[in-house]
Amino acid sequence: MGALAKVATAVLGLSFMVFVTFFGRLPAFRRTPVAWLYRLVWVHLPNGLIAIDERLTGGRTVAALTRFSSYIMYDRHPTVLIFFILLLTISTYLYLPSSWPLMAPIHKILSVPTILCPYLFLYLSAASDPGTITPSNLPREMARYPFDFSLFHPGARCRTCPPTSSQSGGQHGEEEGRAGEGGDQQGGQLKPARSKHCSLCRACIARCDHHCIFINNCVGAGNHHYFLLLLLSTAILTLYGGLLGTSLMTSQMRARFPGWKWAWWRASRGTLYGNRNGRDELGMPFTDWLITWSWGMQDGGRGSGGGVAMGAVTLLALMTSPLVWGLLGYHLWLVYCGTTTNESMKWADWQVEMDEGGVFKRKVNAEKRGRDLGVEPAWTRWPVEAEQVLVRTGDGKPPRGEGLLPGEGPWEAVWRLRDVENLYDLGWWDNLVDVLWPYYMFRDPYVPVAEDRVRRKKKRRARKIILA
Ligand SMILES: [Zn+2]
Ligand SMILES: [Zn+2]
């Protein structure tokens, strides 16, 4: 048990640290132990080590480590992707030969798609275009989502991506292009609503969620569905593998120690356990229950080809499974809220400024407001349009400069996110359709916009953006 307990502790600790690393910076964990641990491990601990290294080696060790870790984290290379594939493959290689002879036929059939699906969706997530925005597809990308005048404003340009040749929105005429040129000489390509420039992919990505080092690719509008399916299939694989391994081990343990039960307190009384010194013994002592587990993990199926390899992989699967299910749950939650990892961080920044009292909103008349077609699409496939503008002033007073800002009417102070509308939240079902079916047409391109407005009554509020 000693060696196995060490492995278990290491795997559990590692899973927890991966969890902290992934989730520690997320708004949902602000002011929780997860965020404190994140700061301890990724801010305070490194600072302490830097101080020590400065004394001992003049900072050379840290410089080398920094280069290495920034290579791992901030360069586009498949190291983590290969690690992921190796982990899947080696685990399968260790697990299958020992468990196969013990499996019932139904599990033999089910195990094939269960093992293959993560590979398939890993390939599709990594190899497909996450939604790279180029001069040629810019008009189409501009029509993907309308600007919400809160997180995304028309006219924003990428500082890195080169501008389109006409300096305009692409599909629009030369006239608008020239009109927009005045203040944007230094600007690059227009940024469609919900897009983000990824410095690793060196491109603007449509509805960019985040850059994922496990797939060595961005998660964006083009591959979000594959990414969710990758999480789902990996979550199923780890849970199924873990439970099946446990069940195979326990059936071996039952065959060897008939008094054994899942729950120790049930195993410990009632049933006939053994015969010692001519007396029947009722129940199994706790230590024997533990030893039986240890036997099951290490030697459980040895006679039939099982053994410590299967036990170790089962343990790994059971311990990583909550992490994968957690990641899947988090991403489904974001879909439910009609937001992305990137946007949830922007909303969190808004909440901070709302707490300080410097955020105002007012109405925007979607039908009447003037549009600069040089920087804004005339039509989008999205069924709703912005009806509010959100402005931060920082001094607690409503914005001045009436004519410069979009919208009309009086300004209203905003204190809570739930008083703000999330334009990109159409409700759980439509949000899911939008993710699973890239570029689904929520609006018929052949129905005039004015007529279409009468039909849509799907607006929701951003109250579901849950932040700590
Ligand atoms: Zn860019
Ligand atoms: Zn990227």
Image (cartoon, helix red, strand yellow):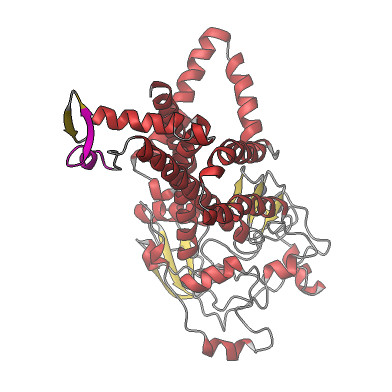
Task: Give the side of residue 156 with respect to residue 101, left or right.
Answer: right
Assign the N terminus to one quadrant of the image: top left
Q: Is residue 336 visible?
A: yes
Residue lying at 53% horizontally and 13% vertically, measured from the top left: 54
Viewer-nearest residue: 49 or 234: 234
Check the image and name the residue furthest to the top: 56
Q: How far across and down, in percent of the image, does residue 180 sit? A: 72, 66
Task: Give the side of residue 65 with respect to residue 311, left or right.
Answer: right
Quarter of the rendering containing residue 156: bottom right
Position of residue 90 relative to residue 391, above or below, is above
Magenta residues (range): 263-275
Q: Is residue 413 visible?
A: no
Viewer-nearest residue: 11 or 285: 285
Task: Give the side of residue 374 with respect to residue 5, left or right.
Answer: right
Q: How far across and down, in percent of the image, does residue 239 sit? A: 46, 49
Task: Give the side of residue 310 with respect to residue 186, left or right.
Answer: left
Viewer-nearest residue: 468 or 414: 468
266 inside magenta stretch: yes
Check the image and name the residue furthest to the front: 278
